Image: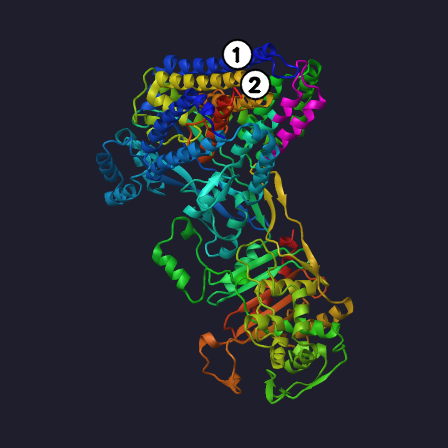
Amino acid sequence: MSNYLKTVDGDWFDRRLAGAMFWILAAFILLTGRLFYLQMIEGKELRRLSQYNCIRIQSVASSRGLIFDRNGQLLVDNRPSFDLNIILKDAKPVDQTLAKLAGYTGFPLAEFKKNIKNIKRAPGYKATLLKSDIGRNMLAIVEAHKYDLPGVDVSVVPLRNYIHPQNASHLLGYLGQINPDELKRYAHAGYKSGDYLGKFGVEKTYENFLRGKRGGRQVEVNATGQVIRVLETVEPQAGSNLYLTIDQNLQELAEDLLKDKAGAVVAMDPGTGEVLVMASSPSFDQNEFVSGLSHEKWNSLISNPLRPMANKAIQAEYPPASTYKIVTAMAGLMEGVIDENTTFYCPGFFKFGDRIFRCWKKAGHGKMNVVQALTESCDVFFYHVGEELGVDKLAKYAKACGLGSPTGIDLANESKGLIPTKAWKKSRVGEKWYKGETLSIAIGQGYNLTTPLQMLALTAAVGNMGIRYKPIIIQKAVSAEGEIIFQQKPVQLGKLPVSREILEIIRQGLWAVVNSKKGTARRSRIVGIDMSGKTGTAQVVRRGKNGSDDDEIAEHHKDHAWFVAYAPSENPKIAVTVIVEHGEHGSSTAAPIAKRLIETFLSKGTESDV
Amino acid sequence: MFDRRLAQCFDWGLLGLTFAISAIGLVALYSAVNAGTLTPQKILFSKQLIWFGIGLVVMVFTFLLSYKSFERWAHVFYAGGIAMLFAVSFYGKIIGGSKRWLVFGPLSIQPSEIIKIAVVIILARYYSKIVNPQGLSFRDLLVPFIITMIPFVLIVKQPDLGTAMVVVLISASITIFVKIERRTFSYIMLVCTLGIPLVWFILKGYQKQRILTFLNPERDPLGAGYHIIQSKIAVGSGMLQGKGFLKGTQNALSFLPEQHTDFIFSVLSEEWGLMGSLTTLLIFIMIIAWGFNIARCCRDPFGTLLAIGITFMIAWQVFINIGMVMGLMPVVGVPLPFISYGGSSVISMMICIGILLNISMRRFE
């Protein structure tokens, strides 16, 4: 070996190499020893275990968290489902076993065979579902004949149970079997094919709180698949329980009031943003989704023109109509276009160029200031305000009030609505803005679109003197051991773009809508409780010059009825938004629903508001 | 450039061993992807053949140019490797919850496989200038420490704890081989013994759980623990002669999730028994000894240390993978060189052999 390194000689180097080789040989001797031990000493036993794949994993599903309302009333729980399974490799001869099983249980043999055919290519030691939810009686029959039914096994699987079917379906959501796409995305989180997961609503949003953690047993089985030894057990961890912000009694009342109508009711606590009611009508039965919806049922749900699968409170977009006058008034007062004493004369119409814009009251309102205009919902007054403001200033205020963007509620697929501007029209419609269009916008018609939840959040903020809260739907998540693992706190999004004084003027108007003699919602005032609100009637189709008198309007061309409200007028405890599709007038269809809810909530508020 | 002398000195023995171990690997892979019931896997065998083809071409390129030029380019290789690891953390493809792959059209590569070689080259360059019989001082170790920690942290974040550990093990073995000053060595040991409990104290509960399960898979009887049991059953059931080609039952039932990649040795052992397994181990040990001999015959310090580093890299992966399959080691995603399915692994191993051939054929220069 030559001395090629400056300071290191060959011998030194050889010694280090020999040392390294020594350690590597030692490591390989260890591997060889292990091989010898496994294959020669343990070999016979391990080969026996390998024959029928004797060591198997039996999965034990975790119990999904329960869902309660704000007062601890149970809304969603789980019930046991007894599922009939077969392990094909253990069940030989399969045909004979199936025939016997059909004989004992009375279930059609053809159905079993069909289920097996579907999975013919899967590994034979995996349990295959023959029939789910067979009931306790059948369980007893199968267990009694187990000796005669090799490879047949009944597993107990918790099944989701919605205690009040059709109730708060859109908010609670439902579970469904994991689909191949979701499986790909979530496989690393421990999901397996056949698992259920939240597909919609709270069940989807709070999946991670609710699902818990699967457990299982490592078992040794004999040649017919009977467990002869349990090697290891991992207990499943139950999911956390959720406490929602909704008040079940109020929710039920809201659903009742919406019966046979299409529309939505949402209510929240103006001081926290907690959603007290979220009802969307028509509704659907979530339990049907759990046990697997038939194709016909699904098709009938999605093709229903009343859109039962949509959560109208957050997904449906409607022109805000006269409820939008709150924003127009705010913008007009803040921009100095009007003050509280400014009056306009309403002759029942407004002339703009050669066009006539009508007030809803043909005879006209006469001289109006802003409070009166809100009270009587005078369109002409707001045409004047809108004309002077221009569309972009109006949009600025609408957006600062939270319109035109999602409220951020923790539910999927929330719509953002639409607040038009000149730039928007140019880029989307490709036309320039016509000044006349601003007039429609000022009274909440035209391109304007809002969701009921957006209008609720705005109303609540007016009620609480200007603080915009994010609508929240859960109070807390509590682990199965009783530990609070998540506590939802109110989230302030910002303030309404308005000063205290100006807000007071608007609140005065909203109070008068319900409580003054000429208020549009006077019929819905509540004795003993001060309620403030605003009605709205959203046009579905543009009316002709004499259109409003036409009695022969088709049902689906009738206007949508809005009502937004909060009560008590000072320090409100509840804000409500109601929309009834094709309900015509806010004052006649929507306001009475809000009235009933507020009445009920405030009269027993002391009990339920804990 | 490629004169007759180089051709005469070509190391046919190492190439022969490489072909032998690759052939064993292909047989095992054929069995792993064909015995199962899942048809889409069958294509993996042809893909692996293509990878070996590409690997051979890359290997030829690796030994055509003298390894001495690698010394000059060491920084570039390293920087390139680190850049790719960064790219993975931004644009990497997520498979099974971890970001390990960079996708270029039909190809997806694992930069963590490439960086191992780059670390070996740059460390060989660094140590070749300061190696001395007294050993390295604390100050000498600072640069290698940084060189190792950058890829370590990036790979841990993917997360791929196994490969990250391999990077550390490779650079630690080279460093210890070069020799650390006795006093420095004892200091390092002291810091480690004191530091580990401290780090343990800082870790959060779930992180501790993860490390404990990593070290002892039996804590997770439904996941890693179950795989280890199945793997041990597969290995043991092979007994002396094995069950025969395509006759493995564990294999046929697809109970091992990574039977064609990380757990392929269990397929080999089940079907070819102790005889097949020992033959495989023997070829591996011959390759390792061959690598050390190349280091011994090389005349310049860079080449020597490079050969040693590459050999350590192969040795560690063989030891960790086979140890894991037999339940001696944590379950980590370390492929078995030349045998596990996977393009990045095959190509990085072919590069390793190319480097060893390169050093070997230029031993008289």
The residue to which callout 1 is attached is A22
Please identify the quadrant where the N terminus of chain A is shown.
top right
The numbered dot on residue B268 is: none
Query: Which of these two is toward me, B86 or A474?
Result: B86
At horizontal 69% and vertical 26% (from top left) the residue drawn is B142
User: Where does label 2 land, which residue?
Assistant: B299
**Which image quadrant is residue B259 in?**
top left
Q: Main secondary structure of the magenta part?
A: helix
Give me the residue at 75% from left, 81% from top. Answer: A342
The answer, for residue B187, to whether it is visible in the render is: yes
Residue at 55% over, 54% down:
A411
Report helix, strand or loop for mark 1: helix
Q: Give the percent coordinates (x, y) of residue A179.
A: 42, 47
Stretch of the chain drawn in magenta: B125-154
Q: Position of residue B8 (x, y in %)?
A: 44, 22
Q: Check whether the beta carbons of the residues at disc 1 and disc 2 lie within 8 A of each other.
A: no
The image position of residue B264, as x and y in percent, is 40, 27
